[in-house]
Amino acid sequence: MTRSESQDFYLKAGDAIARFSVFGAECREWSVAGRRLTWNGDPATWAGIAPVLFPVCGWSRDGTIRVGDAKHPMPVHGFAAQSLFEANQVSACELRFTLSADADTRTCYPYEFTLEVSYRLSETALEVLLRVGNAGSVPMPYACGLHPGFLWDGGEGAHHLLFEAEERGRVPIIAPGGLFSQETRPVALRGRVLDLGHGLFSAEALCFLDTASRRFSFDGPRGRLDVHAPDFPHLVLWSRDGAPFLAIESWTGTGDPEGFRGDFSDRPSMIHLPAGERREHRVSYEWHAAERLAEAANSA
């Protein structure tokens, strides 16, 4: 089954609506009061909209991982985004997707996992919960993340990202193959503010590792999107040069370091989940329309 053939599910809360696909458990649209917030998935630019990342974030060296003496193919950001999930519509505003280990996933990732992706919609917010379980008998290394793209209109200087706390003004240089080099490059932060322009991503993504912030605000002419990612230490910002979207990515892990040849369990920033245990990772996105922000400012 392809994404275009997969079944869609909908959530509705007041004037907000969201659409999801069982293919990848992906949010394919989120709109508030008739205003679409998520990227439209134009395949000429980027066919993704909000991929779920598991069991890796980023690229693996040569597209493979090593577990013990065996090598396994591993797509960029893992296989979850290309997997068919089971869906359970909990209520009109809550939806849960489930993926479990099977013969196909074991060719890439020889662990007995469960992955639940839950969405809850309110009138102004979308909450996402990733729940990872280890159904096997040995510790299970993994990383997970979310990769939503949000519409970005306006030109240079029209948007900025506000960090909750002051951050280091340097990010890793991405080496060929998407690997993380030990070298870094400066990012022009103004205190806690990063001014966004399409040229900012002409070379590569901005990967803020081990951030002090867990809250971020994406401001622009249409309004403000507040992101709260309490369980994700890394923030990645990415766009294609000139494209009208910004991906605000929450990662628990990172891509392989340049030259890494170790076991999958030794990959940096991996979570090692004990047998029989589960772990949760939450992100919430809340939209504040420019009109509402202006009304609030005038009444203050």
Image (cartoon, rainbow, N blue to C red):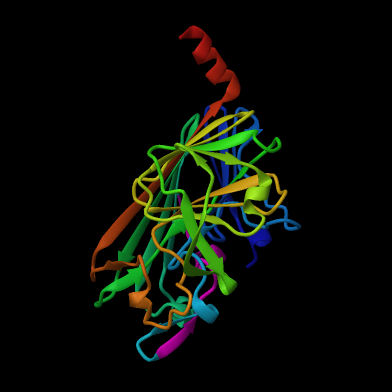
Q: Is the residue 171 above or below the residue 64 in the image?
A: above
Q: Find the residue positioned furthest to the top.
A: 299
Q: Is 285 or 177 nearer to us in this picture?
A: 177
Q: Quadrant of the C terminus?
A: top left
Q: Position of residue 30 (x, y in %)?
A: 58, 40
Residue sitting at x 57%, y 39%:
195
What is the total number of numbered labels drawn onto the structure image? 0
Instruction: Give the magenta part as a residue range.
Output: 70-88
Residue sitting at x 49%, y 74%:
60
Residue sitting at x 61%, y 27%:
33
Q: Find the residue positioned furthest to the bottom.
A: 69
Q: Is 73 on the left-hand or right-hand side of 8? A: left
Q: Is residue 277 visible?
A: yes
Q: Is 167 on the left-hand or right-hand side of 81? A: left
Q: Position of residue 211 (x, y in %)?
A: 38, 49
Q: Is 96 or 70 nearer to us in this picture?
A: 70
Q: Is the residue 263 above or below the residue 149 in the image?
A: below
Q: Is the residue 120 above or below the residue 69 in the image?
A: above
Q: Quadrant of residue 158?
A: top right
Residue sitting at x 33%, y 76%:
265
Q: Position of residue 212 (x, y in %)?
A: 35, 46
Instruction: Examine the structure image and report whether residue 49 is included in the region drawn in magenta.
Output: no
Q: Quadrant of residue 76?
A: bottom right
Q: Position of residue 261 (x, y in %)?
A: 42, 83
Q: Is the residue 276 above or below the residue 126 in the image?
A: below
Q: Quadrant of the N terminus?
A: bottom right
Q: Is 59 on the left-hand or right-hand side of 265? A: right
